[in-house]
């Protein structure tokens, strides 16, 4: 995703939050779902932020098949991500993403 795609998600998308993540999402007209990650400088020095980014990417890699196609999703991890168990993070992120991408009723 590029800067304009991030801006479009923030401007016209919706948001869901949990204990460890804030997820912004919007429909796109593409046959795949695109993910973006944004880690604030307030969360720590570069090494800590890069570790959060790698951890979040690994979470998404494991859940990619669970998420329907056609979404732009930007994930903002919170500071609690660094201390949480990986399995708990995976379950929480899956719950948030399923809630965000479920079809309207």
Image (tube, rainbow, N blue to C red):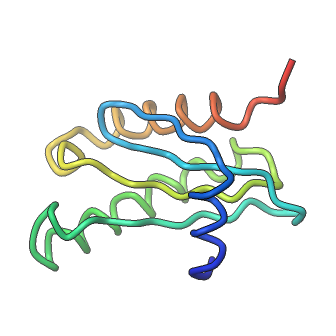
Picture coordinates of residue 43, whole percent (x, y): 16, 61
Q: Residue at x 82, y 59 (%)?
A: 28
Query: Front-most of 52 and 71?
Result: 71
Q: Residue furthest left?
A: 45
Q: Is residue 12 above or below residue 67?
A: below
The single residue placed furthest to the front in the displayed view is: 11
Please indicate whether residue 105 sits to the left or right of residue 6 in the image. right
Residue 13 left/right relative to 86 = right
Identity of the residue drawn at 59% across and 38% down = 97
Residue at x 57% of width, y 80% of height = 3
Locate residue 10: give its quadrant.
Answer: bottom right
Quadrant location of residue 17? Answer: top left
Position of 102 with respect to 63 (left or right) is right
Tell me what residue is drawn at x 89 percent, y 62 percent: 29
Figure quadrant of the N terminus = bottom right
**Residue 5 in the image: x percent, y percent?**
66, 72
| Place of residue 38 in the rendered image (x, y in percent of width and height, measured from the top left) | 40, 66
Which quadrant is home to the C terminus?
top right
User: Position of 12 compared to 87: left or right?
Assistant: right
Q: Position of residue 54 (x, y in %)?
A: 34, 68
């Amino acid at each position: 995703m590029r800067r304009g795609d991030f801006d479009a998600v923030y401007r016209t998308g919706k948001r869901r939050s949990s204990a460890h993540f804030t997820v912004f999402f919007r429909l796109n007209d593409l046959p795949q779902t695109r993910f973006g990650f944004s880690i604030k400088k307030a969360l720590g020095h570069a090494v800590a932020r890069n570790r959060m980014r790698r951890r979040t990417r690994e979470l998404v890699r494991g859940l990619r098949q669970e998420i329907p196609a056609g979404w732009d999703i930007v994930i903002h991890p919170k500071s609690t991500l660094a201390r949480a168990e990986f399995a708990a993070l995976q379950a929480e992120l899956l719950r948030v993403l399923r809630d965000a991408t479920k079809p309207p009723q």
